[in-house]
Image (spheres, helix red, strand yellow):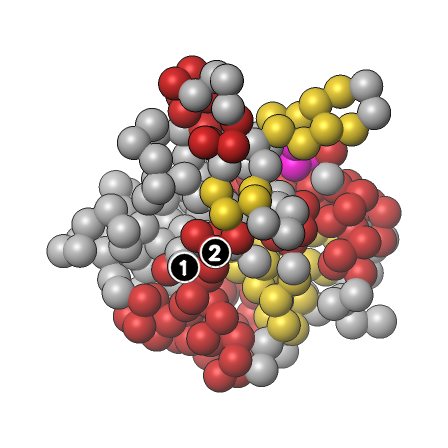
Amino acid sequence: MAIPTNAGTTCAFGDKEATRTILLFGDSQASTWLPAFNIAGEMLQWKVVFLAKDGCGPWISPVTSAQGSSACSQWVHGEISVAKQLRPQVVIPVGLTLSQLSDKEYPSTTQFAGEVLSMVQGLAPSHAKVLFLQEIPQFYSYFTSATPESCLTVHSSSIQNCELTIKQIKAIETTVGLNEVATIDHLETVPIRELFCGKVRCDVFVKSPGESHLVYQDWAHMNATYSAWIGRATAQLLEKYLPT
């Protein structure tokens, strides 16, 4: 699959008639944010151009993946080319690094920070504002059960046994790497973690009047229904960081 030559229209969401554009790009993590950004774009009157390829984080050089590092590299450079052509006001790269899964295949935190910095430098000719999103909770490093759902089958009487703490989230490599680059380049990070976590723990279910929402699809991806449900809240968070 190739990036469409007319990505600005073919891959448009949110307010498609808006003159202001956000480019949301990355891997399957970016995909999980699309329902929220679609609603946020409509509310804030921003077009959202969305590009993603599963397994290919938006970093340079990208994390080795099942898709193949050369294929991912080509895809990421294509996304950056789109940013240069479209000249969006804002770009938001979203993706995973899986260094905890294999010390041999995946980069260290320092290497990952270098990859993110290279991506930011590659985006410079677009003159777009680069925004990071805080990392959402990821479960693969802390539970023997593969997903929150499977954990709940083991700990059905105590949901807290399947929830991460804020302290654990802050130690995730992507979190550390993005924070380092944000500090170096004086970039802003949207505090989306408040949509997933309280002051101490990160919920598996979030309650609202008359219903309860399952937050996760699997070990590291947001449920699409939950993503849409937090669309209005995402708009409120984003609005503070978008240029006027």
Q: Secondary structure at mark 1?
A: loop
* Quarter assignment of residue 223: top right
Residue 168 position in % (x across, y down): 44, 52
Choose between 176 and 35: the one closer to the eye.
176
Q: Is residue 1 left or right of residue 221?
A: left
Which residue corresponds to the image point at 65% horizontal and 47% vertical from the top-left? 198
For the residues bearing labels 1 and 2, Cβ distance under 8 angstroms: yes
Residue 78 position in % (x across, y down): 44, 59
Q: Residues within 10 Å of mark 1 (few under 14, many from 20)?
A: few
* Quarter assignment of residue 161: top left
**Which residue corresponds to mark 2?**
167
Magenta span: 224-228
* Quarter assignment of residue 105: bottom left
Residue 139 position in % (x across, y down): 41, 39
Q: Is residue 49 visible?
A: no
Q: Is residue 96 visible?
A: yes
**Principal secondary structure, stretch drawn in magenta:** helix
Point out the frontmost of discs 1 and 2: 2
Choose between 55 and 124: the one closer to the eye.
55
Could you give the CA–CA distance between mark 1 and mark 2, rounded to whole angstroms? 7 Å
Under mark 2, the amino acid is: Lys
State yes or no: residue 239 in magenta.
no
Residue furthest left as drawn:
104
Query: Label for residue 171?
Result: 1
Picture quarter with the C terminus: bottom right
Query: Label for residue 98?
Result: none
Which residue corresponds to the image point at 49% horizontal and 83% vertical from the top-left? 184
Q: Residues within 10 Å of mark 2 (few under 14, many from 20)?
A: few
Under mark 1, the amino acid is: Ala
